[in-house]
Amino acid sequence: MNKRRKNKKNSGRKEFYLIVKMLTKIEKEMVEIKQQLEDRPKSINETIHINAISSEKIAEWLKSNSLRIQQLFDQRK
């Protein structure tokens, strides 16, 4: 029984770290986009548009995974 419980706990931990890894990847992509924007002249509207697209990607991902994220945080308590 302890082994079974341990495996269940480890799988939740692995998924938690996968979520952190995905969020880190999204953050890196946003930093790259920001750097590309800084490297060339830009209009305010263009910057707002690109930031909005990045925010939409994060929002969609969080929305699609919100239940699983909540479960993982509940397990960690």
Image: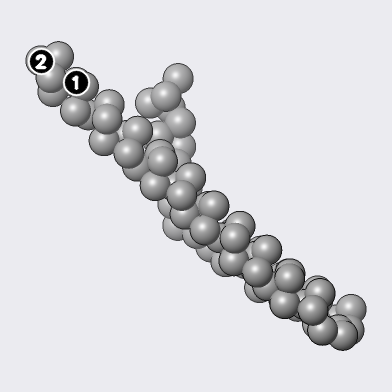
| Amino acid under disc 2 | Met
Residue 16 figure quarter = top left
- The number of numbered discs placed on residues in the rendered structure image is 2
- In percent of width and height, residue 34 lies at 73, 69
* Lateral position of residue 13 relative to residue 57, left or right: left
Dot 1 alpha-carbon crowd within 10 angstroms: few under 14, some 14 to 19, many 20 or more = few
Q: Left or right: 66 with respect to 2? A: right
Which secondary structure lies at badge 2? loop
In percent of width and height, residue 30 lies at: 65, 65
Residue displayed at 81% across by 74% down: 38
The residue wearing badge 2 is 1
Residue 5 falls in image quadrant:
top left
- What residue is drawn where x is 26% and y is 35%? 11
What secondary structure is marked by label 1? helix
- Furthest-left residue in this view: 1
Quadrant of the drawing holding the C terminus: top left
Q: Residue extending furthest top?
A: 2
Residue at image point 72% right, 77% down: 36
The quarter of the picture where residue 31 lies is bottom right
Q: Quadrant of the N terminus?
A: top left
User: Which mark is drawn over residue 5?
Assistant: 1
Distance between the alpha carbons at the discs numbered 1 and 2: 6 Å
Q: What percent of the width, then of the height, locates residue 2?
A: 14, 14
Image vertical order of residue 21 relative to residue 70, above or below: below
Could you tell me the amino acid type at mark 1? Arg
Q: Quick check: marks 1 and 2 in contact, CB under 8 Å?
A: yes
